[in-house]
């Protein structure tokens, strides 16, 4: 009996030591990788001073009209994520990709990620660039920020384009954002391990290997940083505040949505509700994923140009 107990005790100790070693390896590898990858990041765009920090902006194209692109929640490197869309827009427009605080190569701010702060920072960025007339084209969560933005700065915005953009009534925000869990996963290195083991964790357009690697590195740098955490913690209040907002009646609005979306009940109906009273409102669906700009950029730009050309 004593031999059996000693064997069980030794087995438990070996298992516990194995777990400790595994956790230590994951933690150390993450620290080393973060330092090594930091030196591999290739700069792009330009830095714009806002509230004592820098927001990174990439500008391409020389059209007389301007399109401002805003990313979805947690997009690691927006300027690289939007690459297919920028390439389709650039022959016709001046394209401005804004990487909000905590995204891409922008700084991390101490300000809470409320809609008010985010919208003010986007506007200040454009003001610093002397851009005062533009179309807002936003993916996912930018549908919420964009709704607030066009009501505050209606005189500056020519149109709003939503790429599978969020709506205030979409639901799914009943549970508190698991901030503490994400913080532990990031600090421990398990977010990196998860991405290593699960290829579909890296959501990226079809780009060359070098660009894809940059997206991976920058995503790991920014994943669940303080600004991304704060934005998640403000989901409920930001969506709630947007429930009372409507698009200005005379603002042209077009939505490009994922066809047969099964994640949000009534996805198309909720967007139709947003445009039903507008003078110029349109909705189109495409087969694809939530990241339609990865695979449907050509169709998005063609139909956007047609829509704008046919305004009443």
Image (tube, rainbow, N blue to C red):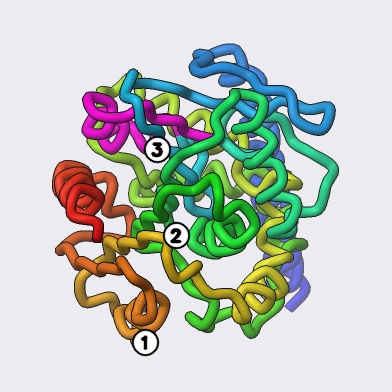
Contact (Cβ within 8 Å) of mark 2 with mark 3: no
Relative side of 129 to 216, left or right: right
**As drawn, 208 above or below 12:** above
Q: Residue at x 40, y 44 (%)?
A: 202
| Circle nearer the N terminus (2, 3) | 3
User: In this orientation, which residue lies closer to the viewer: 274 or 152?
Assistant: 152
Q: Which mark is residue 140?
A: 2
Determine the image quadrant of residue 25.
Answer: top right
How many residues crowd mark 1 within 10 Å: few (<14), some (14–19), many (20+)? few
Sequence-first disc among 3 and 1? 3
Distance from the alpha carbon under mark 2 to that under mark 3:
17 Å
Q: Label 2 to label 1, Cα distance in Å?
A: 16 Å
Q: Which range is magenta? A: 79-98
Residue drawn at x 54%, y 26% as measured from the top left: 57
Residue in the image at 37% along x and 55% along y: 161
Task: Locate residue 4 relative to residue 193 in the image: left or right.
Answer: right
- Reading the chain from its start, which is encountered first: label 2 or label 1? 2
Q: Report how far apart the C-alphas of labels 3 and 1 lie in the structure.
A: 30 Å
* Residue 296 seen: no
Q: Is residue 75 magenta?
A: no
Pair 2/3: label in front: 3
* Label 2 crowd bin: few (<14), some (14–19), many (20+), radius 10 Å: many
Residue beneath label 1, please? Answer: 265
Which marked residue is nearer to the observer: mark 3 or mark 1? Answer: 3
Where residue 48 sits: x, y (%)?
66, 22
SS under mark 3: strand
User: Does residue 297 appear in the picture of this structure?
Assistant: yes
């Amino acid at each position: 009996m004593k031999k059996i107990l000693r064997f069980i005790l030794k087995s438990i100790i070996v298992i516990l030591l194995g777990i400790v070693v595994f956790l230590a390896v994951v933690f150390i590898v993450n620290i080393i990788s973060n330092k090594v990858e930091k030196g591999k990041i290739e700069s792009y765009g330009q830095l714009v001073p806002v509230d004592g920090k820098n927001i990174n902006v990439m500008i391409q194209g020389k059209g007389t009209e301007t399109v401002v692109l805003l990313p979805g929640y947690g997009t690691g490197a927006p300027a690289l994520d939007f690459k297919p869309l920028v390439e389709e827009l650039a022959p016709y427009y001046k394209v401005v990709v804004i990487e909000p605080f905590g995204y891409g190569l922008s700084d991390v701010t101490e300000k809470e990620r409320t809609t008010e702060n985010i919208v003010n920072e986007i506007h200040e960025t454009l003001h610093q660039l002397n851009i005062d007339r533009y179309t807002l084209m936003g993916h996912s969560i930018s549908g919420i920020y964009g709704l607030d933005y066009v009501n505050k700065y209606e005189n500056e915005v020519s149109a709003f384009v939503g790429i599978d953009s969020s709506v205030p009534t979409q639901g799914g925000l009943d549970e508190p954002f698991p901030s503490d869990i994400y913080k532990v996963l990031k600090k421990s290195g398990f977010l990196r391990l998860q991405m290593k083991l699960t290829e579909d964790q890296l959501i990226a357009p079809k780009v060359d290997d070098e660009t894809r690697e940059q997206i991976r590195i920058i995503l790991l740098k920014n994943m669940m940083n303080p600004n991304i955490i704060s934005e998640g913690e403000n989901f409920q209040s930001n969506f709630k505040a947007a429930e009372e907002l409507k698009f200005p009646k005379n603002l042209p609005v077009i939505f490009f949505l994922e066809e047969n979306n099964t994640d949000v009940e009534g996805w198309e109906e909720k967007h139709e509700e947003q445009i039903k009273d507008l003078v110029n409102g349109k909705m189109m669906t495409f087969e694809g994923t939530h990241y339609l700009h990865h695979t449907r950029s050509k169709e998005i730009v063609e139909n956007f140009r047609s829509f704008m050309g046919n305004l009443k």
